[in-house]
Every structure is written in C-alpha cells, then in structure tokens.
Image (cartoon, rainbow, N blue to C red):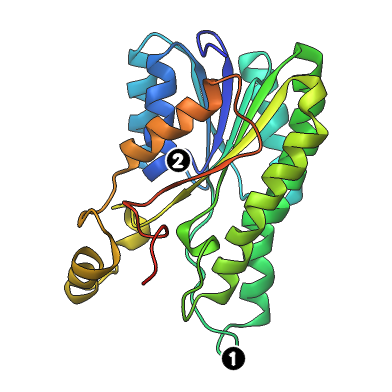
Amino acid sequence: MLLKDKVCLITGGTRGIGAATALIMAAQGAQIALVGREAHAEAIELVRQIESLGVKAALLLGDMGSPEDCQRVVRETVETLGGIDVLVHSAGGAVNGGLLSLTAESWLAAFDVHVHAIFHLCREAIPLMKERGEGSIMLISSAAGVRGVKTNVAYQTVKGALPQMTRALAYEFADDNIRVNCVAPGIIRTDFHKAMTPEAKKHNLDNRIPLHREGTSEQVATLIVELLTNDFITGETVSIDGGMTMRIA
C-alpha cells in the first residue's frame, strides 16, 4: 500500500508514538485524522505541521473508552476526509496496580480503551475498507504483553490480548485485502515513562535492555509505517524493545 492520498485515522495521535506515526505518514502523502481527548497546544501544533507538508489534517476529539466515540470518530473521518484506508489504534496509557490493589473500575476501564475500542473502531471502519478494496490496521501491544512483570496486571492482560486479536482479524479479513498487524514496544522515551526514577532508568539500561538504550517514538513509528505499507505482512506482532524480551533474564 502506498500512503499517498490514503486517509489514515490515528487514535492517541496527538502525542508520542501516534504523533510520530502521523508525521511520517503525512510526509508520504497521507491525509491524517488525529484523535485526542482535548485540543491542547501540542495537538494544534501537530495539525499545523501535518498541513505544512501539503496534506489535509483533522483533529477529532473523543474518549476511546466510549463505544459511541469510537464509532463517531470513524464517521467523522469519512465526513471530513472522504473515506478511511488505514486505522492505527494508539490510544491508551498506563494502568498501575497489582491484583489486590487495582480497583474493579480500573480493570474494566483498561479493557474499554485498549481492547473494546478496537472492536468498535473495526466494526465501523472495516466495512468501509472492504468497499475500497483494501485496508491496513495497526494495533499497539507492549513488551508487557509478551513477558510477565510483577505489577500492572490489567495493563499486561489487555496488551497480551492484542497479538491474538491481530491474528483473528487478519485471518478473518484477508480475503478482503485488509491486513492487520501489531507492534510491541519496549521502553520508549515518551510521557508514558515520564514518572520513571533515575534509578529505574539506570537499571533498565544496565540490566534489562541488551542494547543499553531506550527507544524513541520515531523508531516505533518507522516500524508501524513499514507494517502498514508492506502488502505481504499480516497477522504479525513485531517487538521493538532493544532486545529486552528476546533473552532469558
């Protein structure tokens, strides 16, 4: 798939990995619909940067934990930009707490944003992609969905569901020329990790990451764009974590 003139919807698209992905796709000629919770200064500046590349951009506001908002942002993408060819679900954040400390509300909310949103977004978007004869969908898992850690049980569980959801959707819609892939980032320097202590960062670099450095949003974004555009890859989850999950601790 060539991205020129394609319409791409990116949830969680106003910061971090989503924003970096939007800029790379726009540089390749894609029209971009960004979904965020609010029209903050970073989001407005990102729209300006995208438009400066000579393509259209739309900022859509919504909570991806809401089924109605998931459905609405797909419809608004079509109304504003004329269709939908690519869907990237990058919305979501940390969910802290182990089994005995996590609230039931936080557990359910994690599924709403990270898993249930995909169901609602895809139910709205895939029929439109089928009409266009192709489509490409990207889900964002995590190293925490591949290997176990001692806390954040909800986050690990929802991220662990995404590789299987990727396989299920990829197989179901392969005959429609709709591809579904997933990336599993490790420790990426975004706001997600802004609360990390210097001691934790040193431990990661010294002991957890074989390449002894953190990743960047741009590095993840280049992988996302490759998987979105390579027409012979579907149903795959690709780790990008400096080697963190490939070795025995």
Q: Residues within 10 Å of mark 1 (few under 14, many from 20)?
A: few
* Foreground tag (1 vs 2): 1
Image point (77%, 27%), residue name = 174
- The amino acid type, in three-letter code, at marker 2 is Ala
| 192 up-or-down from 127: above or below | below
Residue closest to the far front: 248
Residue visible at 54% across and 26% down?
Answer: 228
- Few, some or many residues within 10 Å of mark 2 (<14, 14–19, 20+): some
Q: Classify 56 as above or below 169.
A: above
Q: Name the residue located 53 percent from the left edge and 20 percent from the top edge.
A: 229
Q: In which quarter of the image is residue 199?
A: bottom left
Q: List x then y, in percent, for residue 95.
A: 52, 70
Callouts 1 and 2 close, C-beta under 8 Å: no
Disc 1 is placed on an element classified as: loop
Where in the figure is residue 234, as x and y percent of width and height?
64, 31
Q: Name the residue under label 2.
A: 39
Residue 194 versus residue 164 in the image, above or below: below
Task: Name the residue tied to disc 1.
Answer: 100
Q: Which residue is drawn at 57% across and 14% down?
A: 1
Give percent across and percent down for residue 130: 80, 19
Residue 227 located left or right of residue 136: left
N-terminal-most mark, 1 or 2: 2
Say whether residue 116 is left or right of residue 39.
right
Q: What kind of residue is marked 1?
A: Leu
Q: In which quarter of the image is the C terminus?
A: bottom left
Distance in Å between CA atoms under marks 1 and 2: 36 Å
Residue 75: x, y in percent? Answer: 73, 28
Q: Residue 46's quadrant in the figure?
A: top left
Q: Pick whichever, 163 or 153, lies toward us.
A: 163
Q: Is residue 15 visible?
A: no
